[in-house]
Every structure is written in C-alpha cells, then in structure tokens.
C-alpha cells in the first residue's frame, strides 16, 4: 500500500484548500485592503449620446473642430465607452473622421510623430 494514490483526505486535496490551509482562512470576501465587500471605485454614470440628446446636432465631416474632440492626442479615434456616443452615431463619427482625414482637415498622425521622419 505504499504506492497508493493520494486520497481526498490528504493535505493537498481540492476541497480542503491545499497546503495553505482551508479556504476560509484566506480572507474570503475581504478585498486587498481588508474591507468587507466594499468596492474600490464607484461605478461610472452612463453617458448620454450628445447627438441623440440634441436632435439638431449633426455629424459633419467638414466641421473639423467638432470631430477633433473624438480623437486622442495620438490621432486615434476614441472608443464609444469613453466618449459616450451610441453605436449609430459612433459609426457616423468614425466615418466623418476618415473623410476629414482624406481631405486633410484632420491629421492621420499627430504633429510630434510626423516631424520625426523629416
């Protein structure tokens, strides 16, 4: 019986908690800073789409100042979850940005990156 496989009552069994002891001693519901069940950050409030709120506002590729708000400092299009637009208007904004880039109203890359190759 020396080569017998380990039984479930051994110190490393799955339900017991392993070599560090039972799972109840590991902290349970407490977070990293010792609080019982409290979250570290409050949930963000849901942003409302600017274009859905104001029906008179239209996405226009010729209005570069308005579209510049939806670009990062690196020239990338900001994601929906950051700017709060709905899916329909996010598609319109991204299409308008791409059209404005083709007409050189908006940059493909930021100035500090464009100057490196010259």
Image (cartoon, grey):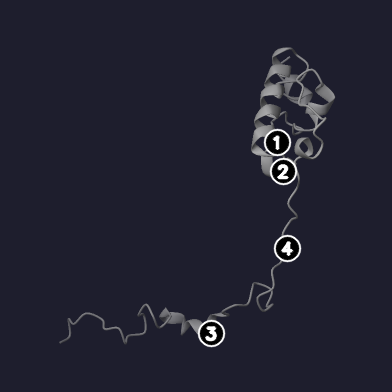
Residue 96, percent from left and from top = 71, 22
Q: Is residue 76 left or right of residue 18?
A: right
The reply to whether the C-beta atoms of the residues labelled 4 and 2 are less than 8 Å apart is no
Mark 1 or 4 closer to N-term? 4
Q: Which residue is mark 3?
A: 25
Number of numbered discs overlaid on the protein picture: 4
Whole-percent x, y for residue 13 in the image: 35, 80
Up the image or down, 110 lies above or below 31; here it is above
Q: Earlier in the sequence, mark 1 or mark 3?
A: 3
- Name the quadrant containing residue 103: top right
The residue positioned 82% from the left and 28% from the top of the image is 66
Q: Quadrant of the N terminus?
A: bottom left
- Per the model, the C-alpha gap separating discs 1 and 4 is 23 Å
Distance from disc 4 to disc 3, alpha carbons, whole Å, reads 26 Å
Dot 1: element? loop
- Contact check, label 3 and label 2, Cβ < 8 Å: no
How crowded is the residue under tag 3: few (<14 C-alpha within 10 Å), some, or many (20+)? Answer: few
Q: Position of residue 43 (x, y in %)?
A: 72, 60
Q: Which residue is mark 1?
A: 78
List x then y, in percent, for residue 93: 71, 28
Q: Earlier in the sequence, mark 3 or mark 2?
A: 3
- Distance of label 3 from label 2 (alpha carbons): 40 Å
Q: Nearer the viewer, mark 4 or mark 3?
A: 4
Do labels 4 and 3 touch, CB within 8 Å? no
**Label for residue 102?**
none
Secondary structure, mark 2, is helix
Determine the image quadrant of residue 85.
top right
- Depth check, front residue: 39 or 19: 39
């Amino acid at each position: 019986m020396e080569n017998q496989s380990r039984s479930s009552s051994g110190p490393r069994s799955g339900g017991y908690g392993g070599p560090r002891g039972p799972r109840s001693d590991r902290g349970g519901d407490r977070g990293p800073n010792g609080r019982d069940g409290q979250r570290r950050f409050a949930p963000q409030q849901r942003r409302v789409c600017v274009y859905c709120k104001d029906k008179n506002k239209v996405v226009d590729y010729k209005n570069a100042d308005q579209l510049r708000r939806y670009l990062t400092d690196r020239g990338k299009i900001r994601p929906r979850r950051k700017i709060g637009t709905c899916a329909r208007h996010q598609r319109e904004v991204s299409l308008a940005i791409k059209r404005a880039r083709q007409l050189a109203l908006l940059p493909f890359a930021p100035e500090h990156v464009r100057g490196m190759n010259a």
